[in-house]
Amino acid sequence: MFETEKQQEKALLVALDTGEYEVESSLLELSELTKTAGAEPSFSITQKRPAPDTATCVGSGMAEEIAGLCQSQEITLVIFDRELSPTQIRNLEELCGVKVIDRTMLILDIFALRARSREGKLQVELAQLRYLLPRLSGQGTAMSRLGAGIGTRGPGETKLETDRRHIRRRIGNLKEQLKEVETARGELNRRRKKDGTVTVALVGYTNAGKSTLMNQLTQAGVLAENKLFATLDPTARALKLPRGKTVVLIDTVGLIRRLPHHLIEAFKSTLEQAATADIILNICDASSPEAQAHLAVTEEILRDLGTLDRPVIPVLNKWDAVETPELAARIPGAVRISALKGEGVEELLLRIEENLPEKTFDIKALLPFSKSGIAARLREEGALLSEEYVEEGLLISARVGERLYSLVKDFELL
């Protein structure tokens, strides 16, 4: 007998306000994450405390209230807007009689659901195992689940081995496999640099419209949904600019406030697609009241990735839905667009052109002795990589821009 309709899980969202972050915004984000994972965020509850309770995170009275809500409202899932310890999860599950997960488990679950490429799947499994490893002892029912709903996708779908040595061996194996993938990508990046290919990375808060913009500019056919983390695997497509120059446009994984450390580590290689790009487009949903905060989150992560020497263009997407246009005045150099309608796209392409780096070429050339002045010029400008006197003249290798290339192109060895 086949199951014709899967029952949607009914979730209760719980936030603990200790003053560390803006709880209301974070809870709204948790609600969107819950919908993305396929559950219905039916109720939410917040408690103010100076610090989390070691046994149940919230106070004992609130824990009892949560258990009562689960029973009276037929709640099947409780999601906490912070990371829980194995003890807290076990105690809460025993008290409430339903599954309890935390924010990190929810995001990991969405990533497991969204990963399509081999690299994406490897990264998700690595993040999940790193998260589970310190939680193996005493997790109780949470560790014995067989893929049934949110918090159990990815490696949790088959019964997870609780032997720490087995988990560590698997983590080591995943790291090796990811290293191979990263080496291949590094080689691709080196080839792009050698060929003088310019890369433009789309970065920004999740659900800001990066994939919609990618589709608008390149007809890439990238999945564009009104859900968080609709794109997990990076996509690269050629983009021809108005003056004829072709660049490579790269769509990257969406960012989020309080992105768990496990995920930042696991997806560092993917995020480095942005770090190695020549130009970065920092895209935000301008219609969101959190637009400026979202741009700041992205800027902070870009800083951590070491992109301060690269041009970053703020892009205010969904501008057609903006009711407070003064936002643009607060963000210097911002370009206003609607990726869905194609509005403002021409201006964005012109801004990309304005920020193009000078094209460079790696060349080998044989300079006649009579042209040794060219070698001196290359030395002065730091473009000369190596030189060797041979019978016919001076054999050089150099990395040159278009201006210097015009001096040596007649002597280039093909």
Image: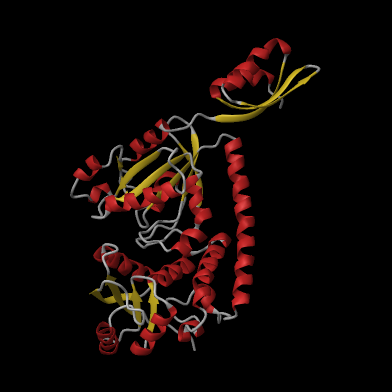
> Residue at image x 49%, y 68%?
112
On the image, the x and y values in percent for residue 299 come to 37, 48
Image quarter of residue 26: bottom left
In depth, the one of 47 and 124 nearer the eye is 47
- Residue 10 falls left or right of residue 190: left
> Residue at image x 26%, y 62%?
22
Quarter of the figure with the C terminus? top right
What colouring style does the render use? secondary structure
On the image, the x and y values in percent for residue 237 come to 50, 46
Q: Residue furthest top?
A: 370
Q: Height in image: 289 above or below 356? A: below
Q: Height in image: 400 above or below 347? A: above
Q: Is residue 340 visible?
A: no
On the image, the x and y values in percent for residue 81 come to 33, 71
On the image, the x and y values in percent for residue 396 come to 70, 24
Q: Height in image: 360 above or below 152? A: above
